[in-house]
Amino acid sequence: MGQHLLSMIVFLPLFGALVMALGRSGLRLLRTGTLAISAVTTLLSFTLAFLFTADGSMQFVRKVPWISNYGITYYLGVDLISLVLLLVIAVLMPLLYLYMHEEKRKGFWYSMLLLQSGVSGVILSLDAILFYLFWEMMLLPVFLMIGRYGAGERSYNVMQLLLMTLLGSLTMLYAILYMGYRFYSISGHWSYAVEDLAKLRFESETDILLAAGFLLAFVIKIPLVGFHTWMAPAYGSAPTPAVVILSAVMAKLGVYGIWRFGFSLFGDTLTLYAPGIIALSLFGLLYYTLRAISQDGLREMFAFASGAHLSMITLGLLLANIYAWSGSLYFIATHAFSSAGMFLMLGLLYRRSGTFAISELGGIAQRAPKFAFFFIFFALSVAGLPGTGGFVSELLIIIGAFKSNLWIGVFAAMSMVAAVLYLFTMSRKVLFGESSEATERFDDLSPLETTILVPLVLLLLAMGIFPSLFMSIFDTQLSIMLDAFREGVA
Amino acid sequence: MLLDLILLAPFAAALVGGLLYLYDPQARREKIYSIIALTPVLLGAVLSLVIGWSFIFGETTHIESTLFEWLHVGDLRIALTLSVDRLSMVMLFFVTFVGALIHIYSAGYMSGDSGYGKFFAYLNLFMASMLLLILADNPVIMFIGWELVGLCSYLLIGFYYREEAAIPAANKAFIVNRIGDFVFIMGVALLFVTVGVNGFGFTAIEASITKIDTAMLSLIGLLLFVGAMGKSAQIPLYVWLPDAMAGPTPVSALIHAATMVTAGVYMVARFDFLYSRIPGVGEFIAVIGIASALLAAVIASYQSDIKKILAYSTVSQLGYMFAAVGVGAYSAGLFHVFTHAFFKALLFLGAGAIIIALSHEQNIFRMGGLRKDSRLLYYTMLIATFSIAGIPPFAGFFSKDAILVSLLSTGHYTLWSLATFGVFLTSYYMFRLFFAVFHARSYGFRVLKPLPLTMTVPLVVLAVGTATLGLLGVGGTFGNFLGLADIHAEADHTIEYLLAIFNLFVVAAGAGLAYRLFAQEAEPPNEESRVRRLLVHKFYIDEIYGYVFVKPLYFIASFTGNLIDHKVLGRMILLGVEGYRRAGEGFGKLQNGRVRFYTLYMLVGISYISYYLLSILGGI
């Protein structure tokens, strides 16, 4: 059981989707089946977390030869960072499937299952080629969901997303292949396992190029400012469950990539890139905030809000001290829940009013007090109010920033004020103000909808009020990883 | 144990009441809501009396209780520890006591409002957050309380969200406070980075404060003070407080007068060990304080809305408190915090009663002659007005006198004379309000709505407090009890008495002027002259902020979006796509189906390969 746990988590959704597709199952069966699959996967992920021991090592490792001629292995494993991401998926997916309750397009359900397998695979892969395959695999369902089931200029928007991410993954593939080849020419056998590639030492020019190959893929996925033109249009066109995954999970995979590959493969060279990435993150924080202020589309606004927070996460990661790292890792989870909550609220808003445009909304609070309550709550959690997990994350990153440099600290602290600049003007217009044609009839939350949102609220509160409960294993784990990184550099 | 209960009871009540309200927002159950809300605050008041008893008559100097470890990362160890020393004891006492009275008052004031349950859930949450702020034993937990009281303030200012002014005012309050808070958190983070290794409780910080060099310490002190500027409504961040009066009047009394807005002064006093090492920053604080005191007093003298006048007077009184803590007279500042809580709460509750009785009239120039209509309101408001103006034996006299003495005895003569001018203005605008409301010619026949007992009893209790509590300051009792790091500058007693008498003349002058102008025929300020218009419009500060900060922000926001995203990055991508297309077309031309072209390509290819091979083999 133990050694197959990860494989089950990764392939159960994909396998279920295949079975249901081949069995030509009806919509009801598809819905029940998907819920059951996600429930089992979530249970498995929680079991994994329960069995996980905090000793800094890779656990539940499963390594079997796959394409042995080229040393490509089926190689999965989990450490603290991938565990956090896995748990985020485990919490979100069932809620998303519940949200999709009335979704009638079968392809949409299949896409979601495929996506779940894809992102889980990315998180757990320890073989570079396998990682790359999952990395590309998760793009397919996103392409389908925006391109087929999206709104607005969906084909143009999805094309832009596809071209940019493909550009990134292509450079990453080159880098991976080159590194594998070098490993072969030095050791005499092929391997793409992360720990093997980490042993390689290159002359500095080559290392810089290889690191660039990986980093390009990751910063486009995050996206850092300058690589972000796909973001707002894609968020605007994608259906709500896809937006949630884009912002809550897939964006983090870029950060995860830097953590997994950047730090272990390119210790020295990464420190060379670090000032640039830190500068980009800080600039992104300000820039995305400014962009969010001038949006009329709610989803574009929160796309930029998400971009600003991911800039903070990236910043914390690159600062590489215990406070910033703990903050970043915690932010990965808390941002996932708050942005998932916010985008779900927007989805529910759209179901009722048929619009995302701030200028066409108004007066919701009078008609739907519960909706307004949840909306305000998630908006405040996005703003990082104390009592929600976002505050703990931002506080730690800010402390980490001051630890490394006064000015970085000053800029990072601006994240505390950034979100309130647009959130409150927005909610004033949307929730209060005059009611409009679109909000003429606006039903309050149904029991099912409340059920979807309550777990997120509770989690965000728990993570804000009892952070030590969640972070108790962060300290030792991250210290071990930090020491490893510092040794690599020194 | 007692401490935990003081804090957790209102939290629990907020949760229960809030859930009950969310479960069915339409249901009317005022009784249940008021029982849920009043029990924990009354309990809190009793418990804080018990604790106060053990402090004053027993040997206790410090109580502590750790609830749980909040965060532990690296050297950062933050526990949710509640601690009461003498400073927080004083805060605890008046917050729970005044808080309980205002809760009782609200039970009557809010009766009939459809958001009754919501109101009390917010109010309980506020009490809990304020107590968290006061009882926190480290700056991080203090900051959490600090932000949460801001949240409650936001929620309660926006309580009447159907009214036009409410939500903009609430947003303004939250955003301005957040601006202060993000600077504050910088101070906290820097403090941790410099001395946090040895623990981050206030006592631990005090023990290692000498390790910070003065420049860094001054920076930290300044950053923390900017947070206080926001929370305690000082120049330049005071603009939210007058607008905050859009909230229900009990909220204005509790949050925007008696408790939350004094958090900044409390914070400075809490960090007395830090600020007493950086007198330069203290000087700055005192200057900001006096400037705020004067500016707000001048504006208050030209307002017509009773709540706005009181709001500006709060800014002004807070300015006095900052002047005191700025020059190092922490106990004098705290004493004013203490007395101010009583008389300002009384003023607001009285104003609320007047507003309710007159069916939501807030313009003092349309009230007139209320003296005959309600003796109770007349005398309670008179006591409060005497107190804020500084007439003995009412509370405000003693605390304000202490501040003026400390300014003079520390040699801040300019600040002292400005502060004295402020005393004149205070007396003038308060008696202006008083005479206009109670004495001036009545506006015809009217029937006052009778006030319920829940509203009158708190008024009387507060009036008694206002009349007597100033005596605590006689002979420095209050200051000795607090034991803060006060600056040692003893003034001669003769000078003190002379000063007190002089101040009385100043007060009398202000009151006399107000009597001449407003006791018979009260006229609203006209806007004929340019200066008057400037004053009535509060120096156009809001408009200036709008043009200097808000508009440019939106302009830059849309400008950068258009420039960088669309013009630069968008064009780069388009160029990339275009280049790719051109290249495709170019290569397409090569493939033209003519055999002689293909032969040419082969020839070129073969020649290149031969050249390459030969070069490798070393032929060329």
Image: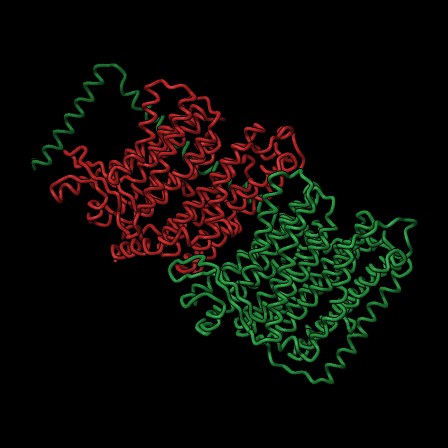
Residue A87: where, in percent of width, then height? 38, 42
Report the colour scheme. Answer: by chain
Q: Nearer the viewer, residue B549 or A487?
A: A487
Position of A378 compared to A92: left or right?
Answer: right
Residue B564, visible in the rendered structure: no
- What percent of the width, then of the height, locates residue B170? 64, 48
Left or right: B149, with A130 as reference point:
right
| Residue positioned 43% across, 25% down in the render | A155
Q: Could you tell me how many numbered marks the image carries?
A: 0
Quarter location, residue A48: top left
From the top left corner, tell me how far across and down residue A211 is, in percent: 28, 45
Q: For the C terminus of chain A, which image quadrant? A: bottom left
Q: Which chain is red?
A: A
* A190 displayed left or right of A352: left
| Chain green in the figure, letter | B
Residue A94, above or below B110: above
Asked whether residue B471 is in view, the answer is yes
Above or below, A68 against B71 in this view is: above
Image quadrant in which you'd find residue A136:
top left
Q: Position of residue B199 (x, y in %)?
A: 43, 66
Could you tell whether B32 is left or right of B393 in the image? left
Who's the residue at 69% across and 47% down the image?
A: B31
Name the one closer to the observer, A206 or B321: B321
